[in-house]
Image (spheres, helix red, strand yellow):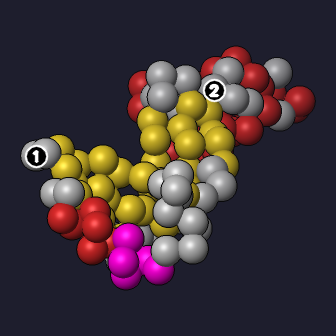
Amino acid sequence: MIPGMRGMSPKKLQQMMKQMGIDVEQLENVEKVIIQLSDKELIFEDVTVTVMKAQGTKNYQISGEPTERARINEEDVRLVTEQAGVNEDDAREALAASDGDLAEAILKLKGPQQQ
């Protein structure tokens, strides 16, 4: 909320922003937003996305509670698939459960009988 605008109707606030050259719209039907960092991903599933356009730029505001998961490299998935003799979905799941640790994922999938 903009300081000093307390008690102002949303419609009046939107009119003022439009006069200042700021256009605000809420994106509809957003299902998921994923932010990829070098080591993990932030996944927003129950999310509200607002776009603010001003002076030729767009700013996106994401509101929601993210869940985190380790970022999984496709090379790692292939390696775990080959070494553990499992399908890609199982390899991906094991890598996620082990926070991307290849050795741990392979050992979990092979089980104690094959070690």
Amino acid type at circle 2 is: Gly
- The CA span between labels 2 and 1 is 40 Å
Give the residue pinned by disc 2: 100
Label 1 packing within 10 angstroms: few (<14), some (14-19), many (20+): few
For residue 11, which numbered disc appears in the image? none
Is residue 12 magenta-colored?
yes
Please tell me which residue is depicted at 52% across the width and 56% down the height of the picture.
4
- Residue 43 appears left or right of 53: right
Residue drawn at 36 percent across, 78 percent down: 12
Residue occupying the far right of the picture: 112
Q: Main secondary structure of the magenta part?
A: helix
The front one of 35 and 77 is 35
Identify the amino acid type marked 1. Gly
Q: Does 55 appear above or below 27? A: above
Q: Identify residue for label 1.
A: 56
Q: Which of the 4 quarters of the picture holds residue 101?
A: top right
**Residue 106 on image: x %, y %:** 69, 27
Q: Looking at the picture, tell me which residue is in the foreground, 75 or 5.
A: 5
Left/right placement of residue 64 relative to residue 9 reads right
